[in-house]
């Protein structure tokens, strides 16, 4: 693998006394899709949210170890967390559009970061809605409330909103878990197309989805990184017995 986009080194995370991640070291390749898999409660979302420091918002969290993005240790005291989160877009499990119009949802981030040029905002909104596969469905009703969209459309709107601030990385926390199969497939297709420009890291509990999308896989179990590597190798010929047992459905 070439130089990783994200490198996690000896990461330990505690929520109070609970040891959630245990000495995790992993590399995330640039402009590929990396799936984080494992049973519920094994630390998948915690690892994902360590990459943009959203775990800072958890009461009683304690972190040791290092996470590098583009060679910069994001837990260093001089790192601007706002700039970091601009670089690392997050798509949550449940669609969370802002209580405003479709247009304003996408324009919100650029406006927060100082963009006031109407023509530039129009171009950004159209470009990001195209990238999220939503433009043709909403172009005639951009002023409608985002709440009028279906759940699948709302999730694609959240993807467009994340893209509008020009991130380098898309962090996706089970982004299709609340969607119907057709909407899920649409989100999957958009993620595959977006890896040409972005590094994508997604948490999933659906092994079929990991097989469809992932170039690279991390398998977590009880807070430990058990195995990592190319998706084809990890999902078809795992080297660790625990990985094999999980993939074969012995537990999970």
Image (tube, grey):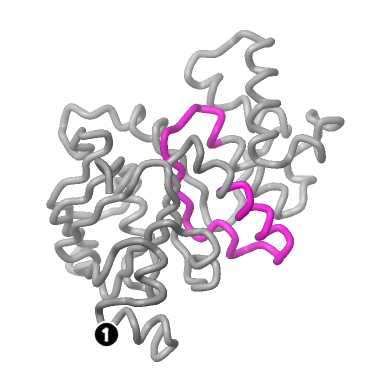
Report if residue 123 lies within the magenta region: no
Q: Position of residue 105 (x, y in %)?
A: 64, 32
Seen at 47% across and 71% down, the residue is 205
Seen at 56% across and 49% down, the residue is 192
Q: Residue furthest bottom?
A: 250
Is 68 situated above or below 48?
above
Seen at 32% across and 79% down, the residue is 243
Q: Position of residue 190 (x, y in %)?
A: 62, 47
Is 58 situated above or below 132?
below
Report crowding for label 1: few under 14, some 14 to 19, many 20 or more residues within 10 A (C-alpha): few
**Which image quadrant: the C terminus?**
bottom left
> According to the image, label 1 marks what residue?
241
Q: Position of residue 222 (x, y in %)?
A: 26, 75
Quarter of the image holding residue 42?
bottom left
Q: Which residues are magenta?
A: 162-191
Q: Secondary structure at mark 1?
A: helix
Report if residue 168 lies within the magenta region: yes
Left or right for 6, reference 64: right
């Amino acid at each position: 693998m070439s130089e990783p986009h994200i490198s996690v080194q000896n990461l330990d995370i505690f929520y109070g006394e609970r040891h959630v991640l245990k000495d995790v070291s992993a590399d995330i390749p640039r402009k590929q899709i990396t799936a984080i898999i494992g049973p519920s409660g094994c630390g998948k979302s915690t690892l994902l949210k360590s990459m943009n420091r959203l775990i800072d918002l958890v009461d009683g969290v304690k972190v040791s170890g290092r996470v590098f993005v583009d060679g910069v240790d994001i837990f260093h005291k001089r790192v601007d967390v706002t700039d970091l989160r601009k670089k690392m877009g997050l798509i949550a499990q449940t669609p969370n559009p802002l209580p405003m119009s479709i247009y304003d949802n996408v324009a919100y981030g650029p406006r927060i970061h100082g963009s006031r040029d109407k023509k530039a905002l129009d171009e950004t909104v159209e470009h990001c809605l195209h990238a999220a596969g939503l433009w043709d469905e909403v172009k005639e009703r951009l002023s409608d409330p985002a709440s009028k969209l279906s759940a699948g459309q709302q999730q694609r709107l959240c993807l467009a909103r994340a893209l509008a601030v020009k991130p380098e990385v898309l962090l996706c926390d089970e982004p299709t878990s609340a969607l119907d199969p057709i909407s899920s497939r649409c989100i999957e297709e958009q993620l595959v197309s977006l890896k040409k420009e972005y590094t994508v890291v997604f948490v999933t509990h659906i092994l079929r989805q990991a097989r469809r999308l992932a170039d690279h896989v991390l398998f977590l179990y009880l807070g430990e990184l058990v195995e990592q590597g190319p998706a084809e190798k990890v999902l078809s010929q795992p080297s660790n017995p625990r990985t094999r047992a999980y993939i074969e459905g012995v537990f999970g």
